Amino acid sequence: MAGGSLLTLLDDIASILDDVAVMTKKAASKTAGVLGDDLALNAQQVSGVVANRELPVVWSVAKGSFVNKLILVPAALLISAFAPWLVTPLLMIGGLYLCYEGVEKLAHRFLHKEEHAEDKTPAEAKAELAAPVTEDEEKAKIKGAVRTDFILSAEIIAITLGVVAEKPFSTQVMTLSLIAIVMTVGVYGLVAGIVKLDDLGLHLSQRASSAAKTCGRAILWAAPFLMKTLSVLGTAAMFLVGGGIVTHGISAVHHWIEHTSAAAGGFGAAVLPTVFNGLFGVVAGAVVLALVMGVKKLRGAKAH
C-alpha cells in the first residue's frame, strides 16, 4: 500500500517535471527573440568601463536582474490566479512597447545622425570613447541596465505566462521560476563572455604560438562586428516578437495572416507569417511613436 502510494507520487512528480520541461522549452523558443536584444543592450551598457570593472558591473546588473525576476514572477502568478483576463492585454502592451522601442531606435539612428555628427568632432568623439567612466557614471550605467532589464524581463515573463496560462498552478510556478533563472544566468553569462572577448583576443595575440596569435587577431577583428550584429538582430527581434504578440492578440489580423500564408503554400507558408509579423510590428511601433511624440508636443505647448 505504502509502496504503491510512493510509486504514484513519483509518477506524478515525473509527469509534472516532464510537463515543466516541455513548457520551458516552448517558452524559451518564444522568448528567444527578446534574448538577442537583451544581450546587445546589456553588452552596450558596460561599454567604456575599465577592463577590471567590466565583470563587477555585469555582476551588479545580473543581481539587479534577479531582483527584477523576484518581483515579476510572483506578480505574474498572482495575475494568473486572480485576473487571468489580464494576460492577453499585458502581452499586447508588452508587444506594442517592443515595437515602439524598435522604431524609436531606428528613428533615433537615422533621423538624428547628422545632428549627433555636428555635436562633436571626430577627435572629441574618439577621446570620449577612450576615457573610462567615472564611479558615478558606472552607477548610472548599472541603474540604466537594471531598468532596461526590468522591461525585457517583464516581456519574457509575460510571454512565458501566456504559454503556461492553462496549466496547473504548480507547473506555472516551476516553469516561470526555471525560465527566470535560465534566462538570467544565460544572458549575463554570455554578456560577460562578450565584453571579455577583446581581452581574450589580446591575450591570445601575445602568445608565442602562431596559431594562438592568428586566433587572437581574428577575435579582435570580429568582436566589434559581433556587437553590431547583435544590435541589428536585437532590433529585428523587437519587431518580430512584438509584432507576433500583437497580431496573435487581434483575431482578425491573426486569421488573415494564417489564411494568406497558407494560400501561398510551400516556402511562402513558412516564411510569410514571420514577414507579416515583422511588418505589422514596424507599423504598430510607428503608430505608437507618433502618439508618444504627439503627447510630448502637447505637453510642451501647455508648459509654455
Image (cartoon, rainbow, N blue to C red):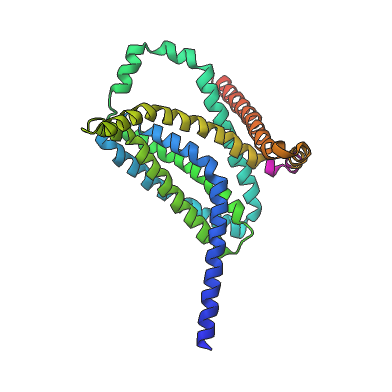
Asked whether 65 or 202 is in front, the reply is 202
Q: Which residues are magenta?
A: 247-254
Image height of 105 relative to 139, above or below = above
Position of residue 141 in the picture relative to residue 50 (left or right)? right
Residue 50's image quarter? top left
Image height of 149 relative to 16, above or below = above
Tell me where residue 119 appears, x and y as whole percent: 41, 13
Tell me where residue 128 appears, x and y as whole percent: 32, 20
Q: Residue at x 59, y 34 (%)?
A: 239
Is residue 291 a member of the stretch shown in magenta?
no
Q: Furthest-front residue in view?
A: 210
Image height of 3 relative to 82, above or below = below
Tell me where residue 262 appears, x and y as whole percent: 76, 41
Q: Residue at x 49, y 53 (%)?
A: 179
Q: Is residue 298 visible?
A: yes
Asked whether 275 or 149 is in front, the reply is 275
Residue 267's image quarter? top right
Position of the N terminus by quadrant: bottom right
Tell me where residue 161 appears, x and y as whole percent: 58, 53
Position of the C terminus by quadrant: top right
Image height of 69 relative to 255, above or below = below
Position of residue 81 in the picture relative to residue 134 (left or right)? right
Q: Is residue 96 visible?
A: no
Q: Main secondary structure of the magenta part?
A: helix
Is residue 248 a member of the stretch shown in magenta?
yes
Q: Residue at x 28, y 34 (%)?
A: 212
Q: Residue at x 60, y 60 (%)?
A: 81
